Image: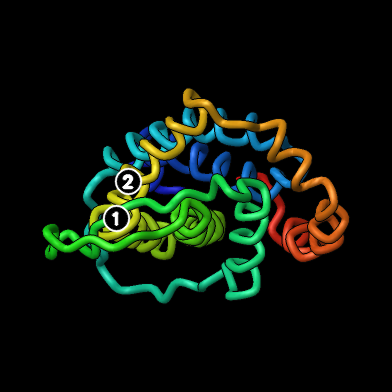
């Protein structure tokens, strides 16, 4: 297969975003054994980078619409959200989020686990579509991801940041949370097979 290096999907900004998106997805898929304190600290650094890298993606016009596969099924979405929810426990904070860009005066609430999983869903679908190597699909994946960022999850990411900042730098009783979660760890670990199976199917290289 001949690669057209002039195609914007191979530009530096896109390639760097793919790297960050993959890091975010892999982090959530493998975070089950990570202490909640370390989990939130890592997110506080990872989320702003994800926002910046997506915000500078090139504007790409799709020449012909290529159907994109939804790699993140409902089961996978629920599993990722459940991992995060169990990890944060009582600190799975409610965040005020805008409904849409066009309705900026209207807000609702969403838990951190939901926001983080919404971002995961879009980034994972993007990464897996980009990974096909089909330039038309790669082009469409950049276009769709940028649109979803601008219209939906970019604002939700920003809304989650204050809550995560509060957990990291506030008076969060991580030790009490660790003791509370101790009895439920066995159940959480037993469900990890869902992601493990998908990781084997997906792989992590680009």
Point out the residue furthest to the top here: 169
Q: Quarter holding the N terminus?
A: bottom right
Q: Please determine whether, in this image, residue 164 is positioned above or below residue 30.
A: above
What's the distance in space between the residues labelled 2 and 1, CA to CA? 6 Å
Upstream in the sequence, badge 2 or badge 1? 1
Q: Is residue 10 visible?
A: yes
Judged from the image, the secondary structure of the residue bearing numbered disc 1 is strand
Return the x and y of residue 103 as percentages of the image width and height: 13, 64
- Check whether the beta carbons of the residues at disc 2 and disc 1 lie within 8 A of each other: yes
- Residue drawn 32% across and 46% down? 159
- Residue drawn 74% across and 56% down? 199
Q: Which residue is mark 1?
A: 97
Label 1 environment density (alpha carbons within 10 Å; few <14, some 14–19, many ≥20): many
Question: Would you identify the image quadrant in which residue 106 lies?
Answer: bottom left
Q: Please determine whether, in this image, residue 45 is positioned above or below residue 84.
A: above
Return the x and y of residue 118 as percentages of the image width and height: 45, 59
Q: Which residue is mark 2?
A: 159
- Residue drawn 35% across and 63% down? 140
């Amino acid at each position: 297969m001949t690669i057209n290096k002039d195609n914007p999907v191979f530009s530096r900004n896109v390639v760097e975003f793919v790297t960050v998106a993959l890091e975010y997805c892999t982090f959530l898929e493998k975070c089950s054994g990570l202490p909640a304190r370390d989990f939130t600290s890592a997110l506080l650094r990872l989320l702003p980078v994800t926002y910046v890298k997506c915000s500078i993606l090139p504007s790409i016009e799709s020449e012909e619409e290529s159907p994109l596969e939804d790699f993140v099924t409902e089961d996978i979405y629920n599993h990722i959200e459940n991992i995060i929810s169990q990890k944060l426990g009582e600190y799975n904070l409610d965040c005020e989020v805008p409904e849409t860009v066009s309705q900026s005066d209207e807000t609702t609430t969403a838990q951190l686990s939901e926001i983080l999983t919404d971002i995961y869903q879009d980034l994972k679908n993007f990464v897996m579509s980009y990974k096909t190597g089909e330039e038309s699909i790669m082009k469409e994946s950049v276009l769709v991801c940028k649109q979803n960022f601008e219209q939906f999850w970019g604002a939700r990411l920003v809304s989650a940041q204050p809550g995560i900042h509060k957990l990291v730098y506030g008076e969060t009783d991580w030790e009490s949370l660790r003791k509370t979660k101790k009895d439920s760890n066995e159940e959480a670990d037993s469900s990890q097979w869902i992601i493990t199976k998908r990781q084997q199917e997906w792989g992590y290289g680009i």
